Image (cartoon, grey):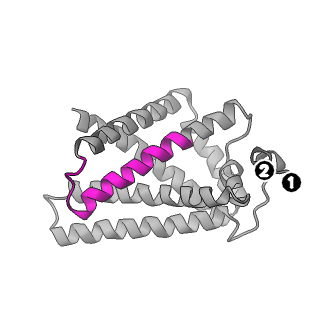
Amino acid sequence: MLHTLHRSSAVIIALFAIFHIANHGFAVAGVEAHIQLMENLRQVYRLPLVEALLIGCVLFQVCSGLYFVARRFGQRQDFFDRLQAISGCYLAFFLLVHVSAVLFGRSVLGLDTNFFYAAAGMHVFPYSLFFLPYYFLAVAAIFAHLACAAHWLLRNRMGAVARDRLGYGMCVAGLLLSAVIITAFSGGFSAVEIPGEYLATYGQAQ
């Protein structure tokens, strides 16, 4: 039952993550394109019931995932089995920190937690040393975790070689997409001007 509930909540989180990552990918087209798409998507995921469901799924996913990792500690043998645990642990860390930071930014700091809220830390040294790998690994970990899930779910439908290729391909795709998103947020495709109220959270002013 716990496995079933874990997979069910994972589906809900994965659907949100797909749209959220696609939204971040729009940063390639510029900050305005990213924010406009986010505003449209927020009309759905900022609905109180939807947001409560997402937060509830995140909390359950983190707790159940860490339980599975602890229960099978030292028993994982192959690459994808170990990658599932490693990526899952990182996602648990990221989701707890990220969701807490967004709620804190909205309720305590009174900021719009949009593109600038996520990107600000990448533009202030030495915080960039944390935020660049923090976000890069988050996207990579999502794709790695999905790759591990696909590798297991397709075990009766595909041969081992085909499943390995699919898994590796998904991991590589995650790394590439993560690099593109981080480059866009750090101003690699077009200039990014971080407003002063966001820089102020890191002790700087524009």
- Residue 57 place in picture, x, y as percent: 41, 34
Q: Is residue 77 magenta?
A: yes
Quadrant (top left, top right, bottom left, bottom right) of the C terminus:
bottom right
**Label 1, residues with CA under 10 Å away: few <14, some 14-19, many ≥20:** few
As displayed, is residue 206 above or below residue 30? above
Taking 171 as reference, is 192 left or right? right
Q: Amino acid at mark 2?
A: Leu
Tag 1 residue: 206
**Label 2, residues with CA under 10 Å away: few <14, some 14-19, many ≥20:** some
- Residue 21 place in picture, x, y as percent: 52, 55
Magenta residues, as a range?
73-98
Tag 2 residue: 199
- Residue 122 place in picture, x, y as percent: 67, 58
Q: Residue at x 63, y 60 (%)?
A: 129
Disc on the earlier residue, 1 or 2: 2
Q: Residue at x 55, y 55 (%)?
A: 134
Residue at the far front in the pictured view:
74
Q: Is residue 205 magenta?
A: no
- Residue 195 place in picture, x, y as percent: 81, 51
